[in-house]
Amino acid sequence: MTPWLRETARGVSIAVLVAPRASRTAVAGDAGDRLRIRVAAPPVEGAANEELIRFLARTLGLPRASVTLTAGAAGRRKTVAAEGIGAEAALRLLSA
């Protein structure tokens, strides 16, 4: 398993490094102990956080309410919880 993905009792926890103001929102590969995700939104008034959550929910095939930001709301290093998915399925979807 990767260091940025951890299985929890309700789903998975994903350690993310966010790069805001990208041309498009996409997974950009590993960044050591975090998954690097480029986000098209600017880091203003939570726009980048909302875009990150929308992107992860869509990519993982989960409802928006199942994906929550658990740490790092004001920084680039964030932790996101996704309920209702296993680690193997999440890894497959995020690596595709």
Image: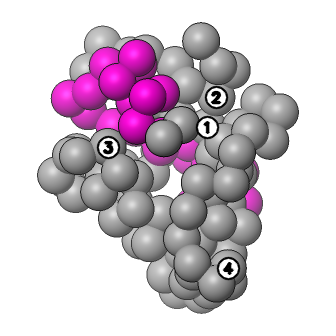
Mark 2, mark 4: which one is toward the viewer?
Answer: 4
Q: Earlier in the sequence, mark 1 or mark 3?
A: 1
Give the image quarter of residue 21.
bottom right
Residue 32 lies left or right of residue 30; in this view the side is: right
Q: Earlier in the sequence, mark 2 or mark 1?
A: 2
- Alpha carbons under labels 2 and 3: distance apart: 15 Å
Mark 1, mark 3: which one is toward the viewer?
Answer: 3
Residue of label 2: 4
SS of the residue under disc 2? loop
Q: Residues within 10 Å of mark 4 (few under 14, many from 20)?
A: some
Residues shaded magenta: 71-94
Residue of label 3: 60
Q: Amino acid at mark 3?
A: Leu
Q: Position of residue 53 (x, y in %)?
A: 40, 60
Q: Earlier in the sequence, mark 2 or mark 3?
A: 2
SS of the residue under disc 4? loop
Q: Is residue 68 above or below residue 46?
A: above
Q: Amino acid at mark 2?
A: Trp
Cβ atoms at labels 2 and 4 below 8 Å apart: no
Q: Position of residue 88 (x, y in %)?
A: 40, 17
Task: Kindly tell me whether residue 47 is visible in this rendering.
Answer: yes
- Alpha carbons under labels 2 and 1: distance apart: 5 Å
Residue 2 lies left or right of residue 85; in this view the side is: right
Cβ atoms at labels 4 and 3 below 8 Å apart: no
Task: Kindly tell me whether residue 75 is visible in this rendering.
Answer: no
Give the image quarter of residue 82.
top left
Residue of label 1: 15
Residue of label 4: 22
